[in-house]
Image: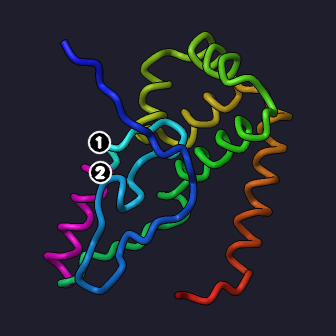
């Protein structure tokens, strides 16, 4: 028997999914890994389905997702901020999630398969003030990044 070993990239730094018109990075290289959980497989399946559909339809692999479709990346950024800034114990957060939610809801959320109502119910079971502070910090960081000029190499 072998023990699996790997390094899960727990970072919400943007990756360049489409470095050129006819090149698409997929999986972890394309930024498909959930930065807070390491889950990649389900997200890769969903994104590849859209990518192939768009390629067949337009000849381009590039797919633009709405902010709503990208909300799970935002949720991951918030959780990473809570953990990185030591706003609350990870063990307490996950214990609370599993104690106060049906396991199916937690796993669906981690896979990015929940609707907004299910997400709000789940969010209602974590320390609200700690997570709201993280939401503010993440929004400020993302807005600064969006409006700060960064020349490309």
The residue depicted at 68 percent of the width and 76 percent of the height is 146
Q: Residue 85, image x and y in percent?
A: 79, 40
Q: Is residue 46 magenta?
A: yes
The residue depicted at 81 percent of the width and 33 percent of the height is 87
Q: Residues within 10 Å of mark 2 (few under 14, many from 20)?
A: some
Q: Quadrant of residue 62?
A: bottom left
Q: Please identify the quadrant where the N terminus is shown.
A: top left
Does residue 95 lie above or below 35 as drawn? above
**Label 1, label 2: how many angstroms apart (C-alpha)?**
5 Å
Q: Quadrant of residue 16?
A: bottom left
In the rendered image, which residue does mark 1 sit on?
A: 41
Q: Residue lying furthest left in this view?
A: 56
Q: Are marks 1 and 2 in contact (CB under 8 Å)?
A: yes
In the rendered image, which residue does mark 2 sit on?
A: 44
| SS for dot 2 | helix
Q: Residue 65, image x and y in percent?
A: 44, 67
Of the pair 67 and 116, the residue shown nearer to us? 67
The residue depicted at 30 percent of the width and 58 percent of the height is 47
The main secondary structure of the magenta stretch is: helix
Does residue 71 lie above or below 10 as drawn? below
Of the pair 120 and 126, the residue shown nearer to us? 126
Q: Which residues are magenta?
A: 44-58
The residue depicted at 36 percent of the width and 62 percent of the height is 30
Q: Residue 107, image x and y in percent?
A: 43, 26
The type of colouring in the image is: rainbow
């Amino acid at each position: 028997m072998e023990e699996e070993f790997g390094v899960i990239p727990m970072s919400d730094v943007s990756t360049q999914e489409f470095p050129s018109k006819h090149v698409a990075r997929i999986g972890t290289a394309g930024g498909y890994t959930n930065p807070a959980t390491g889950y990649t497989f389900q997200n890769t399946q969903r994104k590849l389905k859209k990518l192939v559909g768009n390629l067949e339809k337009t000849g381009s692999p590039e797919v633009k997702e709405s902010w709503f479709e990208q909300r799970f990346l935002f949720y991951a950024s918030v959780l990473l901020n809570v953990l990185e800034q030591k706003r609350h114990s990870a063990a307490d957060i996950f214990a609370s999630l599993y104690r106060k939610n049906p396991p199916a809801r937690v796993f669906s959320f981690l896979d990015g398969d929940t609707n907004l109502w299910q997400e709000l119910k789940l969010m209602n079971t974590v320390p609200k003030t700690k997570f709201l502070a993280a939401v503010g910090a993440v929004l400020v960081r993302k807005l600064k990044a969006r409006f700060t000029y960064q020349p490309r190499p």
